[in-house]
Image (tube, rainbow, N blue to C red):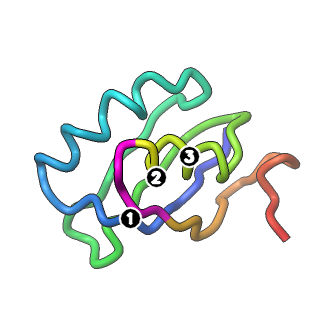
């Protein structure tokens, strides 16, 4: 499993409620969380086979800005050059 980190503009409980169905519906995501107290409103995604681009597409599809920050323990398809 890899942990992918993203900077977002998800900044409140209402925003979290809006993005939750989209992230929960993505079968490649094992777990996720948003740190609303972090200045970057960090979204952390746990997955063994999703790409950063796929996460960006999911989050963007419900109207939020999202920027890939870095993988932790990446799998080969998650390495970004």
With 61 as the anchor, is 14 left or right in this view? Answer: left
User: Is the residue marked by circle 3 packed among few (<14), some (14-19), or many (20+) residues within 10 Å?
Assistant: few
Of 22 and 2, the residue lying toward us: 22
Residue at 23 percent across and 39 percent down: it is: 18
Of 12 and 75, the residue lying toward us: 12
User: Is the residue marked by circle 2 packed among few (<14), some (14-19), or many (20+) residues within 10 Å?
Assistant: some
Q: How far apart are marks 3 and 1 (CA)?
A: 13 Å
Badge number at residue 57: 3
In the picture of the structure, the residue carrying the numbered disc 1 is 8
Q: In which quarter of the image is the N terminus?
A: top right
With 74 as the anchor, is 3 left or right in this view? Answer: left
Q: Distance between the residues labelled 2 and 3?
A: 15 Å
User: Under tag 2, what secondary structure?
Assistant: strand
Q: Assess whether mark 1 and mark 3 are in contact (beta carbons under 8 angstroms).
A: no
Q: x%, y% of residue 67? A: 52, 67
Sequence-wise, the earlier of marks 3 and 1 is 1
In the picture of the structure, the residue carrying the numbered disc 2 is 44
Q: x%, y% of residue 21? A: 32, 27
Q: Which residues, given as a range, are shown in magenta? A: 62-66
User: Under tag 1, what secondary structure?
Assistant: strand
Sequence-wise, the earlier of marks 2 and 3 is 2
Q: How far apart are marks 2 and 1 (CA)?
A: 10 Å
- Viewer-nearest of labels 2 and 1? 1
Sequence-wise, the earlier of marks 2 and 1 is 1
Q: Residue 13 in magenta?
A: no
Quadrant hosting residue 40? bottom left
Residue at 55 percent across and 52 percent down: it is: 56
Of 23 and 71, the residue lying toward us: 23
């Amino acid at each position: 499993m890899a942990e992918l980190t993203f900077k977002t503009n998800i900044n409140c409980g209402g925003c979290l409620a809006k993005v939750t169905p989209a992230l929960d519906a993505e079968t490649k995501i094992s777990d996720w969380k948003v740190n609303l107290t972090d200045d970057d409103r960090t979204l952390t995604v746990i997955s063994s086979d999703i790409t950063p681009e796929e996460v960006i597409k999911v989050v963007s599809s419900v109207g939020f800005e999202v920027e890939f920050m870095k993988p932790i323990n990446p799998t080969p398809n998650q390495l970004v050059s």
